Amino acid sequence: MATTRLDERLMASVGLLQAAPVKFELVSDVPKGGVLCAAPALLAVGLLKHTRPLFSLPAGYYPLETIFLAIALMALARVKSLERLRYEPPGEWGKLLGMDRIPEVKTLRHKLELLSADPTVVHQWSSTLSRDWMEADPESLGAFYVDGHVRVYSGSLAELPRRYVSRQKICLRGTTDYWVNAMDGQPFFVVTQAVDPGLRKVLEEQIVPRLLKEVPGPYSPAELEANPRLARWTIIFDREGYSPELFQRLWQLRIAVITYRKYATELWSPEEFAMCKVRLANGEEVQMALAERGVCLNNGLWVREIRRRDEKTGHQTAILSTDYLRALEVIAATMFARWSQENFFAYMIQHFGLDRLIEYGTEPIPDTTLVINPARRKKDQEVHRQRAWLVRDQAQFGALTSPAGAGAQEMAAFEQQKAKLLEQIEHRQQNLEALKAERKALEPKVPLKDLPPAERFDQLLTAKKHFVDTIKLIAYRAETALVHVVREKLPRVDDARALVRQVFNSTVDLCPDQEKKTLTVRVHPLTTVAHSQILEHLCAELTATETLYPGTDLRLVFAPVGLTTIP
């Protein structure tokens, strides 16, 4: 079972050891050892930066840092759940952590339960990391992308409310997460909603107050006062958040918005459009046919409407913005970069198991939470059904035509059928108006405590998932940092990510040198000579960081096998 450090384990079992020291041995051919190449990036992104002040573990065999590092390396190695760790070689993973074996699933679950016992500490940790990421990348403070993602739940433990899942085009039970990302898709933080009040409410009540508190913005109050058209920063979202009243309230806080326009039916003249050079978020420059107008919304707010015209189909994409200063090319590039957030969702679901449950269990939702009134929903269904019947009868009535050359008896039958159908239409109209009046008398939303016991619901436990998801965000950011290095030699993003995943999956040799205080990670060759040459460039960049392995004084040195000289 790879438990070779018996003395230390025995001491830990009787409480005589606070934590076992991290020790590395000379070993060869460690599978998936290339994941250690992410260690410098993980530490730079902040994996262990705030762990000691906020978290602690009782005396035991595994150090605190080893638990954080193990979960992060598992995420990068595509071990998407704790249960899948049962099918990984424990001793080989232990060599990467400087232990005799990686914690077993039961132990790891227990450690996670201790670390996430206080949800406020987990929230403080993720908020602190989010603030650090924003401060480390001042250019990203100009634009924040907000979008919702539904985590579908098909279990029977909790009856979660239903919500529309766009990727499956159906209403399913689940939880909605609202993510805040940078223009390149890198995540900042997430807001989880067991009962989804909608993007507009989440923006105003949770996301914007948090951003105002944590993001001072690039401009001082004096600069904002001197220029009435200057915005603190810009929020970008899709049509779900479209609301002229919301735009106005956000602008009163000097927050600009960029979104797609709803109900843009009128086509602009092709002569209004001009070819413009637009620089996309990935650095690519493309030509777009753009046009701009000033538009007054129904609440009196003047906004910019920018349209892009497809030269092949003539389709026009309408964008609204309260960013009054930046050029229309920049507005268009900023709006179309929203797909980077959609790509982030897809990548995290496929490679990091973002939607997977971490623990089983439920917790109550506050009784004051407003939920959709089931009586109102039932009345809505009756209104829709009655309206459908009315439309069907009206269509039948409109299709009735008097038979040509009909006799008196046939005309009498025709008139009787027509009168009967008209009477039925009037009856349905009366029923429809009555149902609408009954529906209007019902509140759209009611407190959860007012629902019958059979219709109430709980929410899934969130603390442990929030903790693990935060480590997954760190792992994603660390992988992205390596992708940026690889793109110096391999420009395409998808190719660079594929190569980094290949590096994580590669075999390594570990060569500790206590005299020189180094830990050399010798990465075995990749699938092609060209990839191995890029690996050599990556290893040189990682070695230049002079990163110390956590819990030791060993400096990490990376070198591909076959390199003539080891740094």
Image (cartoon, rainbow, N blue to C red):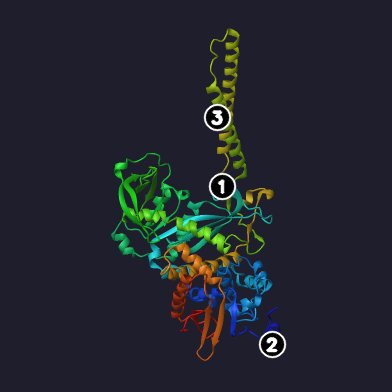
Going from the N terminus, do you reach mark 2 or mark 3 first?
Answer: 2
The image shows residue 523 at horizontal and vertical percentages of: 53, 77
Q: Which residue is mark 2?
A: 7
Mark 2 to mark 3: distance in Å? 81 Å
Q: Nearer the viewer, residue 430 or 31?
A: 31
Q: Which residue is mark 3?
A: 391
Residue 368 lies, with reference to residue 551, above or below; the image says above
Taking 534 as reference, is 154 left or right? right
Q: Nearer the viewer, residue 34 or 243?
A: 34
What's the residue type where badge 1 is placed? Answer: Lys
Going from the N terminus, do you reach mark 2 or mark 1 first?
Answer: 2
Residue 30 lies, with reference to residue 275, above or below; the image says below
The image shows residue 410 at horizontal and vertical percentages of: 59, 11
Q: For residue 82, which numbered disc appears in the image?
A: none
Task: Say how many tags the image has.
Answer: 3
Residue 221 lies, with reference to residue 101, above or below; the image says above
Going from the N terminus, do you reach mark 3 or mark 1 first?
Answer: 1
What's the residue type where badge 2 is placed? Answer: Asp
